[in-house]
Amino acid sequence: MAMTTCPNCGEQISDKAKKCVHCGAILVPEEKKNCPDCGAELEEGMETCPKCGCPIENIIETEKIPQQVEVTGVKITKKSKKIIAIAAIAVIVAAIIAAIGVQTHKKNVAAKAAAEAQKQSEEYGTNLNMAAYSMLSGASDAETCGNLIKQVWYNAIYEKSDSKTDKYTKPKGYYVSDFNDALQNLFSDNSFSSQIADINDNKDTVNSLMKKLKNPPEEYKDAYESLSKLYDAYISLTNLATDPTGSLQTYSQNFNDADNETLNCYNALKMYLEE
């Protein structure tokens, strides 16, 4: 224990002393007490509060006993529990119904999309068949016209008589001086010009269908590729029928090649066509 000097008398005392043992000087003021009832300051040794008469013992006991805090529990009645349970079930049921609704909506959307895709696929298949058969019909007419053009051309040059070509090669009983005159007579004929017009109309129909078929679904990509090859051959053949050019030899060769190519392309496409 350490020693210190009393500030009043200068004698040595303990540094923990509250009162000097030599002169009686108060070194550490005692803690003041107050009456809990009226708040009056109480002096050491009082047995009762001088202001309200409250016993000092009660004050001391009150200070010694710590204040207790009572915690009141929350009581849940059976009725409240039932309401809570019903509410919880309602929330769960609502969540289940919502989940079912979402799944049903997704299925409906998927089913609608699948139906639309099926419809588009069927429509594409129909147009593909129409395009192929239109080309075949136009190619057949072009073949007929092209063969007649070759006959008129040949008979006009070599002065060959034929019941089918005489009215073009020798309309006045004698052969024309130039094969171009014979071909002009052929294209001026009402029956033949009507066939040429039908071929041109057929080309318009085919071109319109090919525009619709530009972006094939996955399952029709191979079919469209074969159809495109047929289209190229068909255009070459029909153009030769409606607008013959060159010499008889080159025309005949080009026409025969286009005719054979059209047939070959059609045969390659048949596996994709509906009967």
Image (spheres, grey):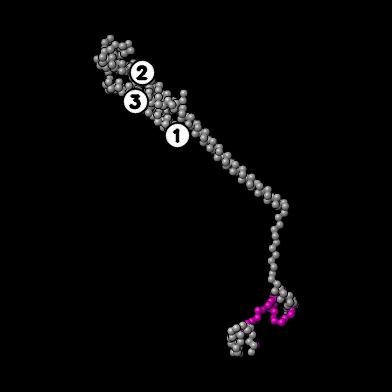
Q: Which segment is the magenta one?
A: 24-48
Q: Secondary structure at mark 2?
A: helix
User: Is residue 67 in sight in this rendering?
Assistant: yes
| Percent of width and height locating residue 130 | 44, 25
On the rendered image, what quadrant is the N terminus found in?
bottom right
Going 71% across and 57% down the picture, which residue do you hit?
75
Give 106 or 168, whichever is nearer the viewer. 106
Residue with the mark numbered 1: 218
**Main secondary-structure element of the magenta-colored stretch:** loop
Mark nearer the viewer, 1 or 2: 1
Report, in whole angstroms, how far the alpha carbon at label 1 lies from the one at label 2. Answer: 37 Å
Amino acid type of disc 3?
Ser
Is disc 1 placed on a helix, strand or loop? helix
Alpha carbon separation for disc pair 3 and 2: 15 Å
The residue identified by callout 2 is 144
Residue that carries the numbered disc 3 in the rendered image: 236
